[in-house]
Amino acid sequence: MSDTIRTKFWNHQLDSLITEIVREASICQVRLLDSGVVDAVLQDNASVCGHDNPAAFKKLRELLMMTFVVRGKAFDSLGPIEADAMIQEISASLRSKLGGTAKGRFGGPAG
């Protein structure tokens, strides 16, 4: 598999996860860009939710955990430089999605 195809594959995998994370965070009204919120979700702390929806929160948590697994596999497949560049691009996309289309609900970029 060529490097370009491999990069596109992993980019698609991570982008799909990010899209679902944004959807579930929106349902739960979780401010993912706020400091410590992702850690709280990973620790199964639903107090960061603005709206109680246990099923959506559970899916959000599982998606965040899956992102770490996929990220690790991307590093193994692409190498650290290529994978890191791809992850930076996807992180910027996440900030854009959360800070742009969902501004107010998520509070925009943390600062």
Image: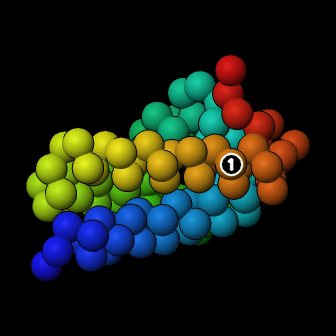
The secondary structure type at the circle numbered 1 is: helix
Placement of 91 over or under 55, stated as above or below: above
Image quadrant containing the N terminus: bottom left
Residue 52 in percent (x, y) is at 73, 55
Placement of 20 over or under 101, stated as above or below: below
Quadrant in the picture for residue 66: bottom left
The residue under the point 23% across, 42% down is 81
Query: Viewer-proximal residue, 110 or 62?
Result: 110
Residue 34 in percent (x, y) is at 65, 30
Image quadrant containing the C terminus: top right
The residue under the point 68% across, 48% down is 96
Residue 10 in percent (x, y) is at 31, 67
Left or right for 100, reference 62? right
Left or right for 40, reference 65? right
- Please count the marks in the image: 1
Q: Name the residue under label 1.
A: 96
Specify the amino acid type for callout 1. Answer: Ser
The residue under the point 44% across, 43% down is 88
Query: Viewer-proximal residue, 14 or 48?
Result: 14
Colour scheme of the picture: rainbow
Q: How crowded is mark 1: few (under 14 residues within 10 Å), some or many (20 or more)?
A: some
Residue 71 visible to the viewer: yes
Left or right for 32, reference 43? right
Which residue lies most toward the top here?
111
